[in-house]
Image: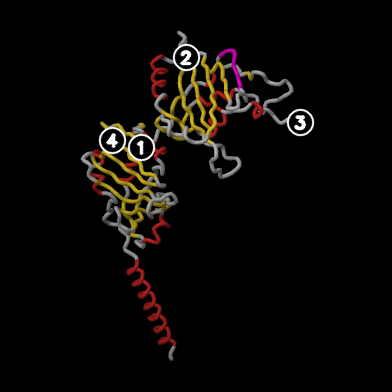
Amino acid sequence: MKINSLLILIFVSIFLVISALASTLIKFNSPIVTSERELAFPRLMKEINQVGKIIITSKGEAFTIVNDNEKWYLKEKNDYPVPRSKVRNFLLELTNLILVERKTKLKERLSRLHLDATSDTSDSRQINIFNKNGKLIASGFIGKRKYFLYVDGRSGTYIRKGEEFQTWLAEGEMNFGFYSKDWLDKSVFDFNPKDVKKIIIYHANGKTLETSRAEPGSQMKLKNILQNREFKTENEADRLAYVIEDFKFNDVEFRNKKNFLNKPHLESSVIYEFFDGFKIKFKIFTLLDEKKLSEFQEPTRWARINIEDVKLLPESKYTLEKINGLKSYLEKWDFKLQELDGIRTTKKMETMFKPLSN
């Protein structure tokens, strides 16, 4: 066979292989949507200002965010307020999702994209958006993020629309949380720790730890300290007051007996007395018999917080209106403490000192 004929045969063979491969790819992969720029949830775009209810299901939990006269509340948290900004950002992100590419519609592959049915172990999130008349205007599943969808750094998100098994890669990011607590403004109050006059921790075993300072801003002194012991840090006692500075909860529940009183627990308390003429009392419930991920994990601690003995001095920087408003708010809720606050509100004196040398 001549060389030219052989080359022609090789080129024809390569062409046929490429054609067959292209045909297979076209058959099993839908085309990328590049020209129409189709919105994932077009009706939401039209009615974004008429949203009345959002239902999110993830990690085995379903929660409802309700619009009541343009104020948003979390139904399952006894109508705890939800910041308008969080709802706004969620709706805008959802509205701006643009379909880019069809992906799998095989049920057994949905979990890879975090688009399988929601459960305790799944990372998928189901969303249902209703207008003020109760009509469903957007529904689907939000899955895994696709980083660097475009060369300019923009990301994408894998989604499913409604109950369809067809999955999509969409342009845009979704940044909402898996849990109901992720939707809340966790800030409760913010006091200057240097305004705390005295702190008394009442431990469950009957022992107490007490610190005090002579005037605002001076160093806290620990009562009944042994003379031969040295603090781990110079401001070890001052740190106990940091709890009341920008205090934020881990989670919140409406105050009732079902939250933790029916579980094995230890009760303790801590009182923060202010120079201004009021006290903040934390009643601490440390849960027992919990499974720990490691030996260093702190137990779950809940707190019932109350303001007591309000006798504001004339020179107080805090108004009676503010203190009474906070007092009324605190009496309605139980707060799950963040780990560091849990440690500080149950601090034992021995843990504040350096180990004894041999």
Q: In the image, is 165 to the left or to the right of 215? A: left
The span picked out in magenta is 208-215
Q: Main secondary structure of the magenta part?
A: strand
Q: Quadrant of the C terminus?
A: top right
Give the image location of residue 293, x and y in percent.
Answer: 56, 45
Q: Kindly identify the amino acid type of the residue bearing the numbered disc 4.
A: Asn
Kindly check if marks 4 and 1 are in contact, taking CB atoms under 8 A apart as contact: no
- Near mark 4 (Cα within 10 A), the count class, few <14, some 14-19 or many ≥20, is many
Of labels 3 and 1, earlier in sequence is: 1
Mark 1: secondary structure: helix
Of labels 3 and 4, earlier in sequence is: 4
The verdict on residue 111 being magenta is no
Kindly check if marks 3 and 4 are in contact, taking CB atoms under 8 A apart as contact: no
Give the CA distance from mark 3 to mark 4: 62 Å
Give the CA distance from mark 2 to mark 1: 33 Å
Q: Name the residue under label 4.
A: 67
Q: Mark 3 points at which residue?
A: 357
